[in-house]
């Protein structure tokens, strides 16, 4: 499963990218507004930080407006994926842009029938919102499973399921278990993924025990070993 970071914060994206596990980035108008920076500059900068799909969302109310905005955003960088809402205007936009080879992420998906429509419109990604469904006592992970299952019935559909609105590490494990192609995570969830108290405790014990080893410097020992091997040859 690919991992995207769901953020428009350049420091977070830079830090997450340095870990070597980030495949792409998703933004939305709320995330862009939160940072208070220029939208276009932000997307352009993100494209330089992560070599993968970078979702940038349109805001026009009509398909004509969305198509114009989408083409403009796509012209910024080859990795820009145009994000459109899952309504009629968004679907028309998806069809138009995908027919021209522009990647489209159809967002705000809350039920499987919507996902089927997005796939038929040529979406590259469908973004079902897991956490927002859980918030209203519906099963967000079950939605991911339903969509994955439906898409599998029709191998001609190439749309990838991008689990969005992820709130905690368990969501990642659950959406991976049901076959989501991608999950997009806020930075705080990404950080929580690798944390485990037993890992920290175990590592501290290993390092403490190493203090009792006579020769502690691994690099010096390897160099000395190789020198001995060389002189023996
Ligand atoms: C998806 O691309 C959205 O940006 C995001 O995952 C929404 O998450 P939220 O429900 O935490 O706002």
Image (spheres, rainbow, N blue to C red):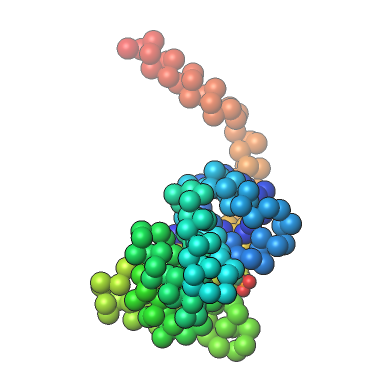
Residue 60: give x, y in percent of width and height.
Answer: 58, 70
Q: In which quarter of the image is ligand 1?
A: bottom right
Residue 84: give x, y in percent of width and height.
Answer: 51, 70
Residue 183: give x, y in percent of width and height.
Answer: 49, 66
**Furthest residue toward bottom:** 137
Residue at 60 percent of width and 80 percent of height: 132
Quadrant of residue 125 in the image?
Answer: bottom left
Rendered-image quadrant of the C terminus = top left
Residue at 25 percent of width and 73 percent of height: 155
For this rendering, which residue is in front, 221 or 6?
6
Q: How many numbered dots are placed on residues in this image?
A: 0
Residue at 57 percent of width and 83 percent of height: 133
Q: Is residue 136 visible?
A: yes
Rendered-image quadrant of the N terminus = bottom left
Residue at 58 percent of width and 27 percent of height: 217
Q: In this view, does 44 lie to the left or right of 114?
A: right
Quadrant of residue 6 in the image?
Answer: bottom right
Q: Is residue 1 visible?
A: no
For this rendering, which residue is in front, 21 or 33?
33
Q: Is residue 89 above or below residue 194?
A: below
Q: In this view, does 228 lie above or below 19?
A: above
Residue 181: give x, y in percent of width and height.
Answer: 41, 66
């Amino acid at each position: 499963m690919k991992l995207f970071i769901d953020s428009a914060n350049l420091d977070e994206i830079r830090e997450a990218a340095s870990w070597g596990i980030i495949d792409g980035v998703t933004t939305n108008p709320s995330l862009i507004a939160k940072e208070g920076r220029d939208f276009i500059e932000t997307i352009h900068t993100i494209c330089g930080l992560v070599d993968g799909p970078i979702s940038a969302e349109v805001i026009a109310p009509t398909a004509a407006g969305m198509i114009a905005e989408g083409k403009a955003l796509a012209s910024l960088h080859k990795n820009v994926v145009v994000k459109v809402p899952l309504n009629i205007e968004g679907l028309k936009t998806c069809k138009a842009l995908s027919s021209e080879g522009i990647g489209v992420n159809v967002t705000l998906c809350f039920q499987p029938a919507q996902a089927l429509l997005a796939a038929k419109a040529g979406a590259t990604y469908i973004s079902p919102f897991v956490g927002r469904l859980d918030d209203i006592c519906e099963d967000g992970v079950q939605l991911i499973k339903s969509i994955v299952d439906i898409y599998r019935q029709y191998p001609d559909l190439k749309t990838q399921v991008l689990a969005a609105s992820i709130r905690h590490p368990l969501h990642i494990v659950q959406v991976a278990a049901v076959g989501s192609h991608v999950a997009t995570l806020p930075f705080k969830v990404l950080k929580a993924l690798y944390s485990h108290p037993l890992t920290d405790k175990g590592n501290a014990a290993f390092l403490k025990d190493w203090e009792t080893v006579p020769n502690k410097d691994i690099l010096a020992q390897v160099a000395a070993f190789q020198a001995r091997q060389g002189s023996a040859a």
